[in-house]
């Protein structure tokens, strides 16, 4: 192989690598990655995770675990109730907003608005059933004017 063709091959490979890197950077900016969906919260899951982590991190004795576990379960129930209440309040807020905005739209805008709302409801349903969004996201997209 002659030195010219060897240098040409090296130059082509380097140019291909650089072109791929540039395309990757621009592609990542044009199409940012979506965060992975989080699985739905299970009742008691938070307290179990905390207890497991604390048992390891703080070297809890079995007696301490027995005393701490009910405290964590009560807190888990309280936090779950707070999440449900916030979701209910946010849904009500969005419903009121839609009721106020809808009369200000013309017929075509109302049709587009309803299409958009149905699309958001489908997304929220997919997130709920597919293991996705947080309660906040669900409440924000599950509104009915």
Image (spheres, helix red, strand yellow):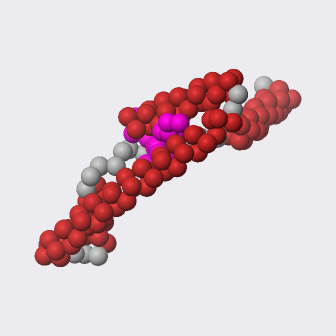
Give the answer, above or below, for where 38 lies relative to 106.
Answer: below
Span of residues in magenta: 130-145
Picture quarter with the N terminus: top right
Q: Residue at x 29, y 70 (%)?
A: 54
- Tell me the quarter of the picture where residue 106 sits: top right
Residue name at image x 37 percent, y 59 percent: 82
Q: Position of residue 40 (x, y in %)?
A: 36, 45
Q: Nearer the viewer, residue 26 or 127?
A: 127
Residue 95 visible to an observer of this rendering: yes
Q: Position of residue 37 (x, y in %)?
A: 46, 42
Q: Is residue 48 above or below residue 33?
A: below
Tag count in the figure?
A: 0
Q: Nearer the viewer, residue 18 or 105?
A: 105
Q: Is residue 24 left or right of residue 33?
A: right
Find residue 64 and report its horizontal and vertical position in percent.
18, 76
Residue 14 forms part of the magenta stretch = no
Residue 47: percent from the left, percent from the top? 27, 62
Which one is nearer the viewer's eye here, 65 or 41?
41
Residue 52 visible to the viewer: no
Q: Residue furthest right?
A: 4
Q: Residue at x 13, y 76 (%)?
A: 63
The residue closer to the viewer here, 128 or 98, is 98
Q: Quadrant of residue 16?
A: top right
Look at 28% across and 55% down and name the residue there: 45
On whether residue 143 falls in the magenta region, the answer is yes
């Amino acid at each position: 192989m002659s030195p010219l063709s060897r240098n040409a091959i090296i130059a082509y490979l380097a140019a291909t690598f650089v072109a791929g890197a540039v395309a990757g950077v621009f592609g990542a900016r044009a199409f940012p990655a979506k965060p992975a969906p989080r699985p739905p919260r299970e009742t008691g899951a938070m307290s179990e995770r905390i207890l497991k982590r604390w048992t390891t991190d703080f070297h809890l004795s079995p007696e301490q675990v027995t005393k701490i576990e009910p405290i964590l379960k009560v807190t888990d129930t309280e936090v779950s109730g707070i999440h449900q209440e916030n979701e209910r309040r946010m849904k009500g807020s969005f419903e009121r907003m839609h009721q106020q905005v809808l009369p200000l739209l013309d017929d075509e805008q109302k049709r587009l608005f309803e299409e958009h709302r149905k699309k958001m409801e489908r997304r929220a349903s997919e997130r709920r059933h597919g293991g996705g969004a947080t309660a906040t996201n669900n409440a924000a997209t599950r509104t009915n004017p």
